[in-house]
Amino acid sequence: MNYHWDWGIFFKSTGVGSEIYLNWFVSGLGWTIAVALAGWIIALALGSVLGVMRTLPGKLLPTIATTYVELFRNVPLLVQLFIWYFLVPDLLPTPLEMWFKQGISPATSAYLSVVVCLGLFTAARVCEQVRTGIQALPRGQNNAALAMGFSTAQTYRFVLLPQAFRIIIPPLTSEFLNIFKNSSVASLIGLMELLAQTKQTAEFSANIFEAFTLATLIYFVLNMSLMGFMAWVEKRVRIPGMMGGSK
Amino acid sequence: MSAMISINNVSKWYGDFQVLTDCTTGVKKGEVVVVCGPSGSGKSTLIKCVNALEPFQKGEIIVDGIAVGDPKTDLPKLRSRVGMVFQHFELFPHLSITENLAIAQVKVLGRSQDEAREKGLKLLDRVGLKAHAHKFPGQLSGGQQQRVAIARALAMDPIAMLFDEPTSALDPEMINEVLDVMTELAQEGMTMMCVTHEMGFARRVAHRVIFMDKGAIVEDCDKDAFFGDINARSERARQFLSKILQH
Ligand SMILES: Nc1ncnc2c1ncn2[C@@H]1O[C@H](COP(=O)(O)OP(=O)(O)OP(=O)(O)O)[C@@H](O)[C@H]1O
Ligand SMILES: [Mg+2]
């Protein structure tokens, strides 16, 4: 292969304004983080509510949550994204539709679509983790809390969820990483996140290997930092005297 | 003496399987009643019906004048007035001993943090564990955890206490430290319903003994009659007694 490696490419001008290619990567990383974090907040909040719903007595609430999970887990992510970006705006009330299509910049509308899409998609996965965590607790904990006079809501808030969330930190960590990886779908609706900026650099400069090597490196460092952060969280909330905790 | 707990013709089914059959008994104010019987005879189920941790389909249970089975009954409120101690302690592992003692006082009874803390410490002192206030449940022995669990129930100023085999998960050398606390409680006039196979405790402390078999109350008599005139007891009760009194 007769490829001309040039690692200096990232400091060269893009020819667009006064930017160098590195600026593109930084801005792409910024969008990636903004998409993933906002999506994660939705996923964590909604997923927790759904996970609790699946463990409640009765039929209606568990069925609603189960249906949600099946729907959002079984439709491919890309299909969901296109639905949110191309279909849903047409179904909105006219003022909202106009706002979405003309009132905000194309980047903002793409951003909103992808955040909602990833948030709702990941919520289904978080839901399953939360449910598993709650169900892993000894049944006696629920009884003990109720016997003290706690309402069902208080039982979840003070007894079940604090324990369940501690148990599921490892699987939640991988969902957290997944939402960062999945955020690359945003490039398909024109949001200039990390992958889109990488492709653009590759096209503009023809230094395709350098561009993708740098992108890989950034994703890698990002994931390692997130794992480090979650490990820190896990350590901070560790219960003394429990498995793996300090005596 | 008036009836604190009265159980009238209670029957309960799990699907087709009848767990309780026409159980009728009661516990008077200040009375200590021991419930015994072979495994699977429905002792736990009966005692859990008293504070509505288990629903029942037929009959009625009245606790301090309040009908447990009445859909209008405020169950959290009722439960907050009845203490319960479980076989596996069921302390909340993510909370320190101090917090375990305080949380329901604060969240259910609306006491201030300081008041709850102080009350908790006083009771902790009473069960001989004041020095362990800052620890977590996982850092205590089984016997210590069960004494904390008793203190936690007492912190709610209960009108009666339910015990479901409080010593059967303990190593032999720890059984007495828990029985001593229970004995002291009984001597102070606490109304107690105790599922236990500790016949020494029953002999010393109980006023009445109930023997259950296959979901029915087979014997319900004075302690002295129960242990005194063994030949007047039913065949099943005699078999059971001879088996557990051997060790
Ligand atoms: N959730 C349930 N569904 C179906 N059957 C149950 C359920 N809980 C208990 N049972 C059955 O009800 C019967 C009574 O159980 P219970 O726990 O009250 O017995 P127990 O006298 O407390 O026994 P042990 O001494 O083993 O604690 C048992 O045959 C048990 O298998
Ligand atoms: Mg039992």
Image (cartoon, coloured by chain):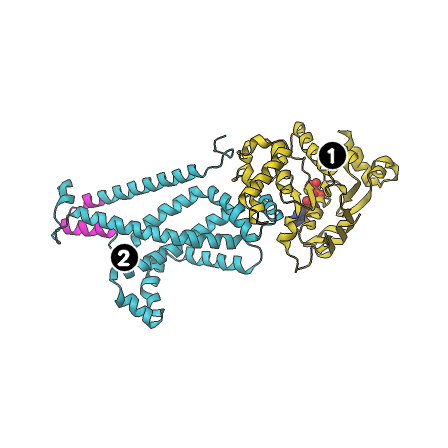
- On the image, numbered disc 2 is attached to which residue? A188
From the Cβ of disc 1, is ligand 1 less than 8 Å away? no
The residue at the point 12 percent across, 46 percent down is A12
Quadrant of the image for the C terminus of chain B?
top right
Q: Does residue B103 appear to the left or right of A217 in the view shown?
A: right
Badge 1 crowding class, 10 Å Cα cut-off, few under 14, some 14 to 19, many 20 or more, is some
Magenta stretch, residue numbers: A195-212
- Based on the picture, tell me whether residue A205 belongs to the magenta stretch: yes
Secondary structure mostly seen in the magenta stretch: helix
| Disc 1: host chain | B
Question: On the rendering, which quadrant does ligand 1 occupy?
Answer: top right
Secondary structure of the residue carrying tag 1 is loop
Instruction: Find the residue positioned furthest to the top.
Output: B173
Q: Does residue A206 appear to the left or right of B63 in the view shown?
A: left
Chain B rendered in what hue?
A: yellow
The answer to whether residue A194 of the structure is visible from this angle is no
Residue A213: x percent and y percent? 22, 42
The answer to whether residue B81 of the structure is visible from this angle is yes
**Tag shown at residue A111:** none
**Mark 2 or mark 1, which is nearer to you?**
1
The residue at the point 33 percent across, 72 percent down is A94
Q: Amino acid at mark 2?
A: Leu
Residue A93: x percent and y percent? 36, 71
- On the image, numbered disc 1 is attached to which residue? B198
Q: Nearer the viewer, residue A110 or B125?
A: B125
Q: Is residue B122 above or below residue A46?
A: above
Residue A156: x percent and y percent? 53, 49
Quadrant in which residue B124 is drawn: top right
Q: Amino acid at mark 1?
A: Glu
Chain A rendered in what hue?
A: cyan
